[in-house]
Image: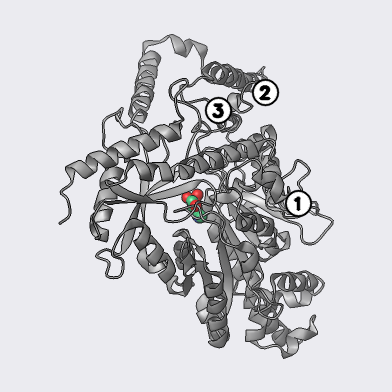
Amino acid sequence: MSDPLSPYFLGAWAENNDLLEKVLLELVRDHVYWRRNFHPDDTPPIATTAQLDDDYRARVAGMTRELHRLTSQLKRSVPTFHPRYIGHMTSELLLPGLLAQLVTTIYNPNNIVEEVAPVTLALEYEAGQGLCRMVGFGTDSARVPCATGHLTSGGTLANDEALWLARAVKLFPLAVKDACEATKVWPDESLRGADDWALLGWPVSRCLDLARRLQRHPELQPALDDARVEALGLARFCQRHPLVADLAVLAPASAHYSWVKAMKLLGLGAAQLHLVPTLDGRVDVAAMAEALARCERARVPVLAVVGVYGSTELGAFDELDALAALRRPERSFWFHVDAAWGGYLPTVFRKPDGGLRPRAEITREFRYFPSERVYRSTAALAEADSVTVDPHKLGFTPYGAGAFLVKDRRAFDLVMQRAAYVFLDTAADDSVYRNAGRFSLEGSRPGAAAAAVALNHRVLPLDHQHFGLIIARSVRACESLYGQLPRVREALAGVARVVAPFEPDCNVVGLSFNPAGNRSLRAANAFTRALYESVAVKPKGPAQQPSAFFGTCTTLSLAQLGDAERRRLADELDLDLAQPDADGLFLLRHALMNPWLLASPEPGEGTYIDAYLAHLIALARAEARAAPRPA
Ligand SMILES: *Cc1c(COP(=O)(O)O)cnc(C)c1O
């Protein structure tokens, strides 16, 4: 039997070129027939005789020349499709999504409203609901909560939406209380005696129940519309509710920098993002609990806590179950999980019926994976209020396809925007997806991206027998690299030390080196950086860079490390980290996504991973010979 994934990618050598060309041609022709048959009796506005004159031909030549120049320039692109590319979080694309995106672009649907995207909005809804089920959210609209998901341009926008929605929901009870006081209508008796501090601690579900209950009190609506932070702006809202000025968001130090942007964007202020230290790259849950307790003592209301399911730097997974458990009925927060990277990992854990596979069954298929912690975190994704997933990362879909998933779709009631000129406000307007532009931060959005994500999910459903096969490969490639580190260490004995600062959770590995005898962090970093230079992409380099492999790098800030971690790293690398002469540890960083990393570049020889490690060993030896020996 052939490799089950072999038809789904173009391939490093474009092995599936015939398939791509044939299907693309069919789909383009199909579009042409569609145009021809729309009003076949109309006279074509572009006269066919025009195509005969010289002027026409000259213009066509000019246009094609530009297109050929473009493709010649594009040859300087980074060959991210190839198993020799093991740098950033990008790789080969899935063919169904790529073809869907290419052909849908010709139809050019805009997923802002059904009126201009009747087909692709439904596809977006399908893709979003599929992702919701993948993370464990319920999607039965007869029940509360019922989840919904929509696509965004990327993870950054999804994170922005999470904070935007969290703010709308968590500050809502304060506005309701103001409106009740103004109108003397009290739909909820518990509001009467509650102070701002108590209201700011309400769980999300309670805020949303309140919002629904108010639908029966239209007499309150005008006062409520005026009292909300969305109407007043944060500054005026804070004059009425001084505690809100301190509104904090707690996130691990490993969180993506988009969180800082989101804080600035919402006017909450970057300083109100409290970064909690990590242990081995994962948030220190005790430190998070302590940070929450500190906020409580200081009467700092916590808007949201962010958990990371696959950190951007090293693919580390926070203990989501433990973070979710930090919510108390009287002191709760919006719990967002940033799974922009790890988002598709649950496909390895899901049965075709949507249930979670037992851990023992999964561990049989791998060497180390999944750790007890990763397993528990995956099961706990369902406890989040919202989740960010990036189909354009481990979903192997073209950019820009991010996704924002919300466990309780009622939350969108609170950010719904009315714009009569775009949106159909009919009584039948009950499905959340038809007017996406009304509640998503973005307006016009490519229907082609929705088609791409939906098609990938249709061809490879989000369970371990289908999509999970791709992710499992990526995890196995990582296990292979990590498992060979003892061998690399032996090969470099007396030359340099090498460590992976943290055991990988999934499919990202960082590696640091230290030349033998050196104790200085700065010199060790210089050594690793020299290795990086040999695998770095050179944006201004020649068209075909003669690099054997492409990788990337990052720096692990020492301030982010706990004492124990620092001691362990100092020991393993034989470095003096008590008085370090640099702020961080420089790392080679590898996102092991490509589905063919365990294929062999030469028949009968080792894998791409083996070849990469051999390359790295050779580079380290050469660098050690070239670099002056430390005194
Ligand atoms: C990539 C990433 C983001 C940002 O996503 P974009 O799609 O680049 O906007 C946010 N969070 C995490 C954890 C990521 O890995």
Please name which of the two marks, 3 or 1, marks the residue nearer to the observer: 3
Q: Earlier in the sequence, mark 3 or mark 1?
A: 3
Q: In the image as oriented, which residue stretches furthest toward the bottom?
A: 193
Whether disc 3's CB lies below 8 Å from ligand 1 is answered no
Reading the image, the residue beneath label 3 is 9
User: Residue 547 in the image: x percent, y percent?
Assistant: 31, 32
Residue 467 disc label? none
Q: Is residue 154 visible?
A: yes
Task: Kindly identify the amino acid type of the residue bearing the numbered disc 3.
Answer: Phe
Tell me if residue 417 can be seen: no
Q: Is residue 229 left or right of residue 565?
A: right
SS for callout 2:
loop
For residue 415, above or below residue 456: below
In the rendered view, would you say 315 is above or below 228?
A: above
Residue found 45% across the figure and 67% down from its top: 264
Q: CA distance from mark 3 to mark 2?
A: 34 Å
Q: Label 1: which residue?
A: 431
Comparing 618 with 486, the one in front is 486
Q: Position of residue 599 (x, y in %)?
A: 50, 28
Is the Cβ of the residue at disc 3 closer than 8 Å to that at disc 1? no
Residue 253 image offset from top left, x and y in percent: 46, 65
Q: Quadrant of the C terminus?
A: bottom left
Quadrant in which the N terminus appears: top right
Cβ atoms under marks 3 and 2 closer than 8 Å: no
Q: How is the image coloured?
A: one colour
Residue, disc 2: 38
**Residue behind label 2 places its C-beta within 8 angstroms of ligand 1:** no
Displayed quadrant of residue 476: top right
Cα separation between marks 2 and 1: 30 Å
Task: Please tell me whether mark 2 or mark 1 is closer to you in this view.
Answer: 1
